[in-house]
Image (spheres, helix red, strand yellow):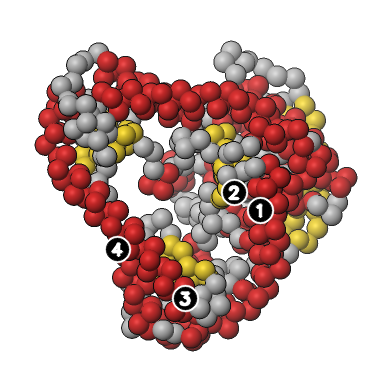
Amino acid sequence: MFQPVIRPSLSGDACYCWTRKNRSQRKQVSTYLVQQRALSGAEAVNALRPFYFAVHPDFFGQYPREREVNENSLKRLNGYLEHLQKPGSNSVLPMELTFYVRDTKENNQKQSGFRSVTFILHTNDVLSTVMNVLTSCSLPVEHMKEPKEMSKSVHDAGVPFHRPIKWDKSYYTFTGFRDPEQELQQAKKVEHTLHLWLRNCESEATNKHNASLPRREELSRLKKELCQKFLLADIRWQRSWGVAHKCSQLQSLSRLSHQNPEALINLQGHTVVFADHSGMNASGDVMLGTMDVHHQWTKLFQQLPSYQSLWQQTGWLRERISDLLGGSQVIHLEKLGPIQPIAEHYSTLSTFHKSLMSQHLRLHPRSLHGLTMVLENDRSTPSLHEMGHFIIPTSCDHLKLQIFLQKHAFEARKRTLHRNQLQVEEEAVVKLCLQRLSLMGLSKEPGVNSSQMILCCKRLMEEHSPLMQGLHVCVSHFYSVMQDGDLCVPWDWKN
């Protein structure tokens, strides 16, 4: 945290004062950590991201022994953390763990080797355990402190504020998160017109795209093979990971299917989503945590019948709520918010249904048929979204809710019709743009709506730049050349 600085020119009194200040700083940090011991499982996973990235078995494909050691140690570490999160768990036995930790050179995504690290876990809370793991592997821990608290404590101590953590470039490649430093540099260098930017970046994009073609073919082959073998509805990804990492995730699932094919039988008919955490989401998709190891995936597959039963119960609750609210349907829009686990979605539906049953609403059985609504726990008043769906708090006055729904039903239908028309137009324009510009692919980020996408595609066809031929284009809010050669262009690009 705070390292002593040796200054030979200091007098004895000055050294004594400095030592007291340094001890004070350490005490403030220790006090802060003690006050923040209630770390949840999800927070622990996020805090351990740099560790998972450094030791995950999927990165040791060419080193079977090291991969096996890391996989076994991860199993034991996860068991240790799970035990600490159980109610009434006061202490656990000390545990010795060994990991092979990858080393990466700065500004270079190629692996430069790994080192063996052995340490003993003897902590009795999640936070201390996470700190022990990170420090034992010589990984950064700055992200474990809240900026406001640290800023205040450091300021009071009279030393400069510690700068935010600077992740290795490969961290952003693996997680799919955007590198703020790279985006800042690109923003400074960005040209004011699409044509000039394409002229400067087309060569780089083409080279990256050509280099990624073998990986793209492998990704397509693996996806098709797994979908056909286990009758999967689809395979998707929560984040914008690069093609290489998508391949790595599919290869990991493929290895598991060869080692234990019976484990994947329960996946039949499901959509698999590689996400931050394992489980089932509100849409009924099976989520595979990219930081998890095979035994955790296998455990999830064994629990799928229970998840499926819970999913069926949520369907029943949605039908009952629809009957009580004039035929309107409760939906969950993953694109408009974070992924909601099925258990949380069921709890929300159950709470809302019970509150509706306690009061009798006077809505015609089909007066709201064709309309949709989203339930939110942290909202106090109902509202109507610009896309046409209602946003309803799970706890609200039902008489006011009835009046609101009846009052805004006509406007909701109008907006829903407009949204559907825009979606049809968007699909047609995207298809035409792909053909006219000879693009390999055309997509958009979740933050780009249909109106913006339609306008952008029409303008791209008018511009008809040959510099985009054969490339993948993603409509976004900024200019960027992605690691696999995909071009990100802002929807409102300038001529």
Sequence order check, earlier mark of 4 and 2: 2
Give, as a three-letter code, the residue at label 2. Answer: Ile
Looking at the rendered structure, the kind of residue marked 3 is Gln
Crowd band around label 4 with a 10 angstrom C-alpha radius: few (<14), some (14–19), many (20+): some
Distance, label 3 to label 2, CA atoms, is 26 Å
Residues at discs 3 and 2 in contact (Cβ within 8 Å): no
The reply to whether dot 4 and dot 2 touch (C-beta < 8 Å) is no
Mark 4 or mark 1, which has the lower sequence index? 1
Q: Is residue 101 visible?
A: yes
Residue corresponding to mark 3:
435
Question: Which residue position holds label 2?
Answer: 235
The mark that comes first in sequence, 2 or 1, is 1
Residue identified by numbered label 1: 223
Instruction: Give the SS element for disc 4.
Output: helix
| Disc 4: which residue | 451
Asked if the residue at tag 1 contacts the one at tag 4, i.e. Cβ–Cβ closer than 8 Å, the answer is no
Q: Nearer the viewer, residue 178 or 113?
A: 178
Say above or below: 191 vs 480: below
Q: CA distance from mark 4 to mark 1?
A: 32 Å
Camera-nearest residue between 422 and 256: 422
Q: Work out how far the residue at label 3 is from the one at label 4, CA to CA, in angstroms.
A: 20 Å
Taking the spot 67% from the left edge, 27% from the top edge, the residue there is 302
| x and y percentages locating residue 373 in the rendered image | 29, 37
Q: Position of residue 298 (x, y in %)?
A: 71, 32
Residue name at image x 33 percent, y 33 percent: 330
Above or below, comparing residue 198 to residue 445 in the picture: below
Q: Residue type at mark 4: give it.
A: Ser
Q: Which structural element holds mark 1?
A: helix
